[in-house]
Amino acid sequence: MALIQAKPFRLALLQLGPLGRVKSANIDLARKAVEQASKSEPKPHLIVLPEIWNSPYAVSDFREYSEPVPEPGSSSSSSSSLDEGETIRALREMARGAGCWLIGGSIPEREISTDKIYNCATVYDPEGRLVAKHRKVHLFDIDIPGRQTFKESETLSPGDSLTTFEAPFGKIGLGICYDIRFPEMAMIAARQGCIAMIYPSAFNTTTGPMHWKLLQQARAMDNQIYVAMCSPARNKEASYQAYGHTMVVNPLAEVMAEADEHPTIIYADIDPEMLATTRRNLPVTIQRRFQVYPNVAE
Ligand SMILES: NC(=O)CCC(=O)C(=O)O
C-alpha cells in the first residue's frame, strides 16, 4: 500500500452544455468554459471535462467524430495532423492558455494502425504536454427494456490497461463513466497512492437517479479517497439524455459539491489532511487481510 503524497489543490469540473452535432462549436464551448474556470478565484489546479463532449454520445456517431490520439509524452511540435486530431490540438492549447492541469474529458479515438475506435480520456500539464491517456476499460453495454439500452461495443473496442498520472499536487487515478461500477479499478489506484479517482462521465436519466451518487460514495468510502464524476449538461434535443449532476465526494463519502442538470462549473478543494484524518480514525486501509481472501478472479 503506497503512501498518499499530496498537497491541497482545487478542482474545477465543467458540466458543458448545450453540446450539439457541430464538433467545432463543441470545442469552442469547451475552450470558453476552461478559460472561465481558469480565471476563477482561487485559481483551480486541475480542470476536468466530461465524457464524449466533442461528439454526440451515440454509437452511430463515434467513428465519424473519431480522431487520432498520440501516445503520452509527445509534444505538439513532434505530432503531425496524421497522429493528432483537432480536439487534441485544441485541448493542448486550452491547458496552456489556462496554465492549469487539464483532464480533457473523453473523445472517440481512432487508432490508425488497427482502425479500432476507443472511448479515450486525455490529460495535459499546464505546458500543454499530453501526460496520460485512458481508454475506457469497461464498455457501457446495458439493456433495461423500455428505459435505457446502449451498446458501446457495437462500434468501440475496450482499453486494456489502468491509468494514473502524477501531478505536483498528487497522484490521480482516471476512469471513464461505466468504469466506476468496477470497484477493482478505484481500489488499485488507491493502493497505488492516488488521492482521487476522477471519471469523465455521462450517466442517463434512468441509471443516474439510481446509482450516480451511490457509486461515488461507495468508491470513496471503500478506499477513503476523493471521487469526482464530470457529466455533460442535459440536452433535451439529444438522443441520449445525460444525467448531469457533476459531483465531488470526500473520503468520508460526503458530497462536497453537486450540480443540477444545467450547464455549470463546480469547484472543490481537495485536502490531503482530511484524507489522512479519515484513515487514522477508521484504519481499514491497513486492516485488510489479503491472506484470508480467495483469488476473486477464480
Ligand atoms: N457512459 C456510460 O458509461 C454510462 C454509464 C451509466 O449510465 C451507468 O449506469 O453505468
Image (tube, grey):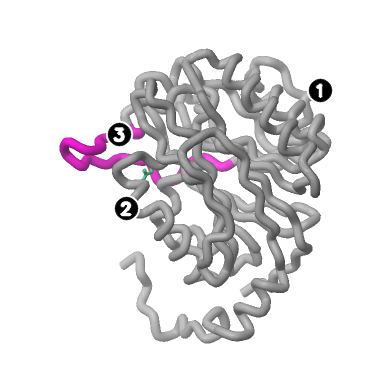
**Residue 67, percent from left and from top:** 56, 21
Q: Is residue 90 left or right of residue 41?
A: left
Q: Looking at this view, is 269 or 153 the one in front?
A: 269
Whether ligand 1 has any atom under 8 Å from the Cβ at mark 2 is answered as: yes
* CA distance separating discs 3 and 2: 19 Å
- Give the structural element (helix, strand or loop) at label 2: helix
| Secondary structure under the numbered disc 1 in the rendered image | helix
247 lies left or right of 33: left
Amino acid at the residue labelled 1: Ser
Q: Quadrant of ligand 1?
A: top left
Q: Mark 2 packing: few (<14 Cα in 10 Å), some, or many (20+)? A: few
What residue sits right under mark 1 in the picture? 77
Viewer-nearest of discs 1 and 3: 3
- Pointer 1 local density, CA inside 10 Å: few below 14, some 14–19, many at least 20: few
In the depicted view, which residue is nearer to us: 81 or 281? 281
Amino acid on which the number 2 mark rests in the picture: Met
Magenta stretch encompasses residue 149:
yes
Dot placed on the residue nearer the N-terminal end, 1 or 2 = 1
Q: Residue at x 25, y 37 (%)?
A: 148
User: Is residue 254 depicted above or below 99 in this figure?
Assistant: below
Q: Are marks 1 and 2 in contact (CB under 8 Å)?
A: no
In the figure, is residue 139 to the left or right of 96? left
Left or right, 1 with reference to 57: right
Numbered label attached to residue 151: 3
Q: Which residues are magenta?
A: 134-153
Check disc 2 and report the residue beneath it. 210
Q: Is residue 162 visible?
A: no
The reply to whether the magenta stretch includes residue 281 is no
Tell which of 16 and 54 is nearer to you.
16
